[in-house]
Amino acid sequence: MNRNQKIAVGCGAAGCLGLILIVIVGCIIYFAMRSSGMGTNRNSASGINRGSTRNANSSANANTNSDAQTKGDEEANSSTMSDDAKHKLFQAAGGTQDTELMQRVLRKMNFIKADGTSTDEYASFLKDHIAWAVKNVEFIQSINTTEKARAYVEEHIND
């Protein structure tokens, strides 16, 4: 292989890695916008809140206790996950292209508030996720189909 051929192979590999990175960043931005209420799910999230408000009015003590218990359970679930596990679950959820499943994962990690808006921790997580994705291309490639991504999420969402 001569020098020019080596250069061409190197440029091709760099171009492929660049495209992969662009796709990852695009997915992160897309899901960040959807979860922050800029997408079509904004109305459905507020509909859920209206339903929970009615329940809160009819029996405030019961809902307050169950909400506190649920929040405690969610915090316990998310705090037991390592940062790497959170990034893997988040990446796999994005790979499923299933908005409901992505919302479920974000709620599990406490990145979505009760009103459907994202938390400050979520913005920080997204910044960290970009760096994580660059270092974990092999994992991302291992869940490169919606079926593989869904299987990973289903297997690890209760970790």
Image (tube, grey):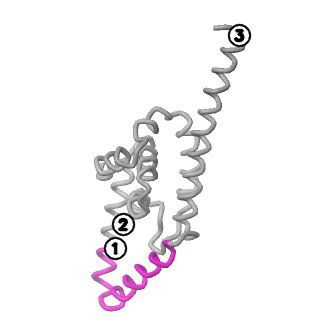
Q: Is residue 125 left or right of residue 14?
A: left
| Residue type indicated by callout 2 | Lys
Quadrant where the N terminus is found in the figure? top right
Q: Name the disc covering residue 71, or none.
A: 2
Q: Position of residue 99 (x, y in %)?
A: 43, 62
Q: Position of residue 106 (x, y in %)?
A: 44, 59
Q: Is residue 140 left or right of residue 54?
A: right
Q: Position of residue 59 (x, y in %)?
A: 30, 88
Q: Mark 3 vs mark 1: which is more N-terminal?
A: 3
Counting labels gives: 3
Q: Main SS of the magenta segment? A: helix
* Residue plotted at (33% across, 86% down): 55
Relative height, residue 102 to residue 95 (above, below)? below
Q: Position of residue 122 (x, y in %)?
A: 53, 57
Mark pair 2, 1: CA separation: 6 Å
Q: Is residue 141 left or right of residue 77?
A: right
| Residue type indicated by callout 1 | Asp
The one nearer the camera, 51 or 71, is: 51
Residue on which the image places disc 1: 67
Q: Name the disc covering residue 3, or none.
A: 3
Q: Which region of the structure is painted magenta?
A: 41-67
Tag 1 secondary structure: helix
Local crowd size for mark 3, using a 10 Å CA cut-off: few (<14), some (14–19), many (≥20)? few
Q: Mark 2 vs mark 3: which is more N-terminal?
A: 3
| Residue type indicated by callout 3 | Arg
Tag 2 secondary structure: helix
Mark pair 3, 1: CA separation: 65 Å
